[in-house]
Image (tube, rainbow, N blue to C red):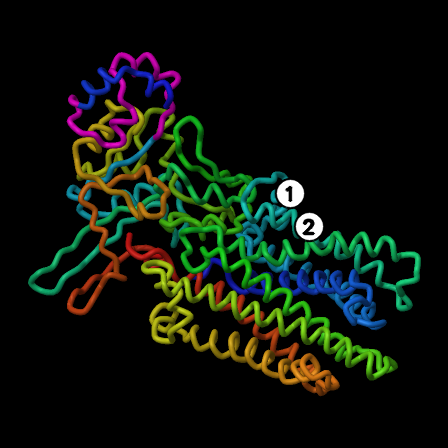
Amino acid sequence: MELNWGMPVILYLFLGGLGAGAMTMSAFTFLRSGGGGFGPNYFAEARYGALLAPLPVMIGCGMLIFELGSFHAGYWFKWINLYMTINLSPMSIGTWLLTLFIAISLAYAFTFLKRDASPDDSFEPMRKILAWMALPVGISVAIYTGVLLGAMPARPFWNSPVLPLVFLFSSLSTGVALILLARSLFGNSAVAESDHAQSSYLLSSTDTVLIGFELLALFLFLLFAQLTVGDVGHAASVILFGGTSIQMYGMNLAATFWFWVILVGLLIPLAIELRYVVPRLLHQREFALPRVAEFMVPVAILIGGFVLRYVVVIAGQVTGPIGI
Amino acid sequence: MSKEHKSSSQSRREFLKKVGAGTAVAAGTALLPETALSQTEERKVQYGMLIDTRRCIGCHGCSVACKAEFDVPLGFTRSWVEYVEKGDFPNVSRNFLPRLCNHCTHPPCVDVCPTGATFKREEDGIVVVDPDVCIGCKYCIQACPYDARFINPETGSADKCDFCFHRVSQGSPPACVETCIGRARIFGDLNDPNSEISRLIATNPVSVLRSEQGTEPNVYYIAADHSDEHQAREGQHIRVTTHRKQLERR
């Protein structure tokens, strides 16, 4: 089975969602300004998200250019045509949205760039304005990737209004994971242990809620697809049952989905985070997520986010309308 | 359309009696012949094709004529013929299903094109691609329920059947129509109730492909075999040979 959209598009959907999620969560944390118990550490977390956000989105968009037929035929800059018009195609809207995103995220990252950036420096007013712009633009980019795939009745697997929500929650969750990962790798050891634990708790509990919503959205996506007789039900079965996926794809897409997306990407991180979040939430015990888990949980979430894009992009293309 | 609705109900009834059917095409274009003539200038043309599969012998003449007309690169097809084999001996059949772009009334490829490179021509309803504008993002390939599109490796742009509009605008029929030895293909203006294609559609049971997609194709079939491999069940063999690089229908 020939795939028109391959690895570059899969990587773009993952990296675009990752960057959008990171910027959204960074702006969200920053605008709370230590409210909601984030404490003095909020600024460092917002800084990680802000500095990391533009890069994956720019790499992802670059990937897309490699997938273009015109690029393969040697017309390397023909994609500029995207900027010659604006119409109601999700891709056209997405192009302008991503351009806006990259501009805002670069400016937002710039306000955090200095090593001694702090809430008291001269960038603060600009930072606030950019954070308010980053929220809607970040969420829009995260949703847009699902709309891009969902806009076509000829692709029954993708043609679901729940798919953009799955991608939105996955984007936000991988965005938090990126901030957690950066913190565990480059975290300042000078930060007081209690402050560190407090912001860990807030990030982990946010992530727990996002994973919960993502599971819910995925459940609804699959449930309604499976209950629909015909094209959609047939398409959904390719990631639900191993037999169908081997017959249609020649590879066990269902096993990939259940193991890497559901188990590794969602259930295991959820279980680990709940194990440490619940005692703090219900019994006010100390939040003591081991440093190893602080590294492993985000890695698992990032793997799950990537494989989710992989499975969805492949499954959408190997299935089609039934009958002629 | 509004002008057509203004025509008196009396004349509409007479006309319907004449063509002997109340199909959508006939009803939508119910005009007296002389009125139709006087309004030719204003009336929009919607070119369409009717493929009488009873007259198709599966010779691939249309595919070859199309290849020659456009110098379509190796491995790609704008027009192709599928063979549908089904049944188990001795109850077997083999039918031919010539395929091409359906030049839909609601083309999903046009809706998703981010550059406006693909559009439906105002003057004759032909869906075309401007290879100078198209960047080859393949969104239209995903959106087409008929798998009619491909990326032309030479231009790097989306490519597909364009009803030979360079010939049609000069008064010649499309290459596949001209070459068809069984005269299985009839090309013409669906908005003209007196055209051969409109008369045949009005007087025959016709079908379109994947009507549930809501695209309202302008390529009609007489006696098309809509069997698909997905429908093969225990004890009934169905095999579709697409004769193109995409071995399976999508």
Q: Is residue A205 above or below residue B41?
A: below
Give the residue pinned by disc 2.
A99
Q: Is residue B221 above or below residue B241?
A: above
Q: Residue at x 61, y 60 (%)?
A: A63
Provide the chain ID for the residue under circle 2.
A
Within-10-Å neighbours for mark 2: few <14, some 14–19, many 20+:
some
Q: Position of residue A143 (x, y in %)?
A: 59, 56
Q: Is residue A61 above or below residue B186?
A: below
Q: Residue at x 80, y 66 (%)?
A: A35
Please tell me whether residue B39 belongs to the stretch shown in magenta.
yes
Q: Nearer the viewer, residue B138 or B167?
A: B138
Q: Earlier in the sequence, mark 1 or mark 2?
A: 1
Q: Residue at x 9, y 64 (%)?
A: B89
Within-10-Å neighbours for mark 1: few <14, some 14–19, many 20+:
few
Report the amino acid beneath label 1.
Answer: Tyr
Report the amino acid beneath label 2.
Answer: Thr
Q: Position of residue A90 (x, y in %)?
A: 55, 48
Q: Which mark is residue A83?
A: 1
Q: Element type at marker 2? A: helix
User: Where are the magenta residues, as a range?
Assistant: B17-46
Q: Position of residue A42 (x, y in %)?
A: 81, 69
